Image (cartoon, rainbow, N blue to C red):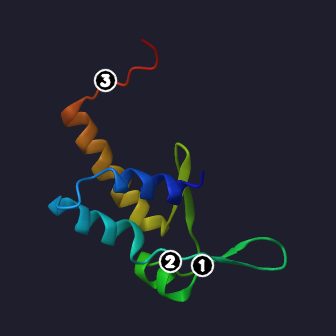
Amino acid sequence: MSRMQAMATAADKMGVYDSDLDDLSAMLFADARPLAFDVAGRIIIPADMLHHAGITDSAVFVGRGNSFQIWAPAAFHAAQMRALENLRKSRPNLKISE
C-alpha cells in the first residue's frame, strides 16, 4: 500500500461529521499530485512547489523516518533550530524498545 493510500485509509476511519476531517483532507489530498520523472529517473519538482518552498538553486533532502522532505537550505536550518529549541523545552523520551 502506498503512503497516500495509507493516509486515505486512516482518514476514512474518522467520523464523517468530524470537523477535523475537512481540514485534514484538504491538507493531505487537495494539492497532492503525481510527479514527473526526467529521462534519468529523477523527479521533476513543479515550479509552483519550488516557489512555495523558496527553493531556487539548491535544496536539502531531510530524512523523516519512512519518508523525506525537500527544503530550501536556509528555511530548513531555521526550522531545525526551532525544533531543537522545542525539544530542549519538552525533553521527549523516545522509547526504542519495550
* Quadrant where the image shows the C terminus: top left
Do the CB atoms of the residues marked 3 and 2 lie less than 8 Å apart? no
For residue 55, which numbered disc appears in the image? Answer: 2
Q: In the drawing, does residue 64 fall left or right of residue 43?
A: left
Q: Nearer the viewer, mark 2 or mark 1?
A: 1
Q: In the drawing, does residue 13 fall left or right of residue 51?
A: left
Residue behind mark 3: 93
Q: Classify 10 Å Cα crowding around label 2: few (below 14), some (14-19), many (20 and above).
A: some
Q: Amino acid at mark 2?
A: Ile
Q: Position of residue 24 (x, y in %)?
A: 29, 63
For the residues marked 3 and 2, what is the alpha-carbon distance in whole angstroms?
34 Å
Residue at 34% x, 59% y: name it.
78
Q: Amino acid at mark 3?
A: Asn
For residue 78, which numbered disc appears in the image? Answer: none
Q: Position of residue 86 (x, y in %)?
A: 23, 43
Q: In the drawing, does residue 89 fall left or right of residue 63?
A: left
Residue behind mark 1: 45
Tell me which label, 3 or 2, sits earlier in the chain.
Answer: 2
Residue situated in front as seen by the camera: 18 or 34: 18
Q: Position of residue 5 (x, y in %)?
A: 52, 57
Residue situated in front as seen by the camera: 42 or 7: 7
Q: Secondary structure at mark 2?
A: loop
Do the CB atoms of the residues marked 2 and 1 lie less than 8 Å apart? yes
